Amino acid sequence: MKHLNPVFIISLSIVLALVALGALAPDLLDSSSALVHGFILERFGFAYLLAGIAFLGFCLVMAIGPYGKLKLGADEEKPQYGYFGWFSMLFAAGMGIGLIFWGVAEPLSHYIAPPAYLESGTPESAAFAMRYSFFHWGLHPWAIYIVMSLSLAYFSFRRGMPPLISSCFYPLIGDHIYGFVGKSIDILAVFATVFGVATSLGLGALQIGGGLSQVFGIPSGMTTTLIIIVVVTILYLISSMTGLDKGIQILSRTNVFIALILLAAVAILGPTNFILDVFTDTLGAYLSQLLPMSLTTAPFEGFDWINSWTVFYWAWWISWSPFVGLFVAGISRGRTVREFVLGALLVPALLAFVWFSVFGGAALHMELRQGVDIASGAVADSSGALFVVLGAFPLSGVLSILAVLLLSVFFITSADSATFVLAMMTSRGSFSPPAAKRIGWGVVQSSAAAVLLLSGGLEALQRMAIVAALPFMFVMLFMMRSLLRAMSYELRYERNSN
Amino acid sequence: MLKTALVPLSLRESRAALSALARELKIMGTRELTLLHIASSPASSTEALSSKIQDRAAIFEEEGLIVETVLRKGSPALELTRTARDLGTDYIAFSWKRKSWLQRTLIGSTTQDSIRLSDRPVYIRKGAVRGPAASLRGGAGSGQAAHEDSLVVVYATDFGATDAAVMPFLHRPNIPIDRLVLLHVGPRAPDPMAESRRLAAAEANLKRLASECNVPAVATRNVAGAPKQKIAREAARLGARLVVLGKRDAPGRFAGVLGSTAGALAFQSRASVLIVPPPSSRRAADEKSQEQHS
């Protein structure tokens, strides 16, 4: 019973209650979550955009300013993982399955359904589609993750506090982190993590099912999806039991390796020059439009498009940030703040740019140059879009198998790291959470995904994660303040006295 | 140390306020003062203004103070600090008139500008919090252990160079302090262990400072938080009738934009405030003044 702390009991109860509601009364969960979700996106859209640019600015200050020389650990500590292992795990935890899902579907969706002021299916909408895909998966998501992970790493490894989100607020609220305020923050983090990850797992299982259907002709129904969830759950629980050093690291490295092979194959077998042109052109447009895009709310043209994409993404990344933040903090011990921020900000963003250029570029090439209509299909069924594009390539069978393999391994690494992080958050920040707790959270996550897929409540669950992101946005803004105060204190008082 | 004062007059002060200020200046040990009015409008009649100033001077003379009057024209805060330097007065004493945030934003504040510009100590006499507490002596504050007629002084220290400038003022008989509370408000350390080290170091420093004071009763108080917000609140809690604060030569990077702790305290504190600049700024100002005269 010693592991049953309030954070564990309360968060598990809330999660189970909402999953039960989603299973028994999906319509009620759907309508209530839609109401709150719509209200938040409509009324707080501007706040998400402002917070997003503030997080990015904060990262730049951290990287360039005097805080950059501080180490996330003792001064003499060395990084635990090499660069390749570190980047692989960063990427697997932060983007992984989502990038595979949206790599083709998002550019095609923007191309076919851009904001009202752009004409659909034109070269302008194609350029817009690529630019916004870069924007949604580029620097901002990683800036959000960095705020969380940098704070956690600093307070845990450098200041010797437990790796809990509440620990990051000690400079602001002192011993209240052990009381109601601290516990509430930790419960909210567990809540956002379970729902965010369960949604991704549900969507990922659907996509794997779509891939298997495409490659092997296996009927993609609910039974197939449930079997996929069961098999993958067993695999990720095995991986989770081996800990960070073995399971997750090996899988993440394998994953990035498979991703690079798939990427290279599509780039070489596909319209190589077109892809390179798309990459170069979109990178330029992204960099030159970064600030306007970051603050565009389009009040005169209608806020709907920004609402359903940019604001949704920002909220989504924020809801994922407790999980990714804790995981990324755990693998970044021993790095300097500057190295950490620049590495975590630039490398995964660059990889996402390349991914979108290759897959989105190949899909748009088929649309614009070859006259193949894949966009409408991709909008109707986002999970199958990748396989539709791969189907048009030479060696499509091999590429599709690689994609299914990649999806499965990303599924495992996301769930694996989420399980580890959840167990850690509900074990007072222990880096060796009890095995029973890891298995427990793994089963809860997968069951939530499966039950809600069956009942049709998965989208409602996703909306609940977005709802949890609103208070978390404010938590993160205060977190920046707290981290700045702590680092300033260290530089001003402790370093000077040394 | 506070023998001569320069008192700026807007000529809108009530007789009661000036009378209360005169009594308090005497308590602070002041014997001579110069009343200064700075006319902002060139069209103002010199005779009429001089007559009004003379009328106010009588109030101070009634308290046994030696009074001189000066009339100048120009920017109030600049002229005020320049006059203090030229006359060599020990400090500048304001009779406080409350201004709202909006008034301060739109019209500005001579007091705040003077705090920023002055190389002399600036004393701001606040109105009474309760009934008879219109002067330094008399009337307890809202806090504990403040006797009706005792002068409770809070000195907010950051253990920096300001201690050297402020501590001489805290010796009797310079200011007839009955009870002195040495208050330290510092930012909380990033973790509990560092925080306990910080608290221990602050306690040791407070004890050291306390041992240097020759005041009948000395207490210490150690608080975590932002000085700008906490000093005034703690002073009220401690029942202070006077809050003393040292001003830094080089305030923080953002002080120009966000305002200094001294400037904020002048408005937030319910007790009177004495802000003491570092001795180096006074030395530099005196040298500059001598050069100009020679």
Image (tube, rainbow, N blue to C red):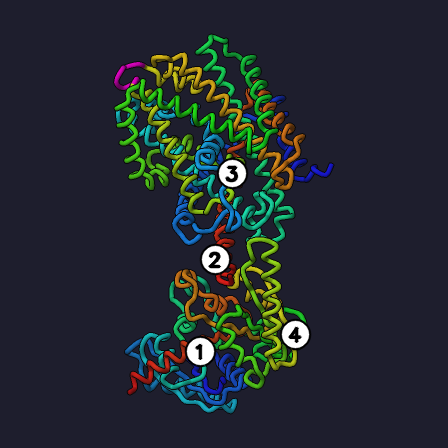
Question: Label 3 vs label 2: CA separation?
Answer: 25 Å
Q: Position of residue B39 (x, y in %)?
A: 34, 78
Give the residue pinned by disc 3. Answer: A331
Chain letter for the residue marked with disc 2 in the picture: A
Q: Residue at x 36, y 17 (%)?
A: A389
Figure label count: 4
Residue A32 appears in the rendering = no
Circle 3 marks a residue in which chain? Answer: A
Asked whether the viewer can see residue A229, the reply is yes
Q: Residues within 10 Å of mark 3 (few under 14, many from 20)?
A: many
Query: Where is A454 relative to A197, above or below?
Result: above
Can you tell which mark lies on residue B279?
Answer: 1
Number of the front mark, 4 or 3: 3
Of badges 4 and 1, nearer the viewer stands: 1
Which residue is labeled 2 in the image?
A491
Kind of residue indicated by mark 2: Leu
Relative side of B5 to A187, left or right = left
- The correct choice, above or below, for A488 with respect to A223 in the image is below
Q: Nearer the viewer, residue B240 or A70?
A: A70
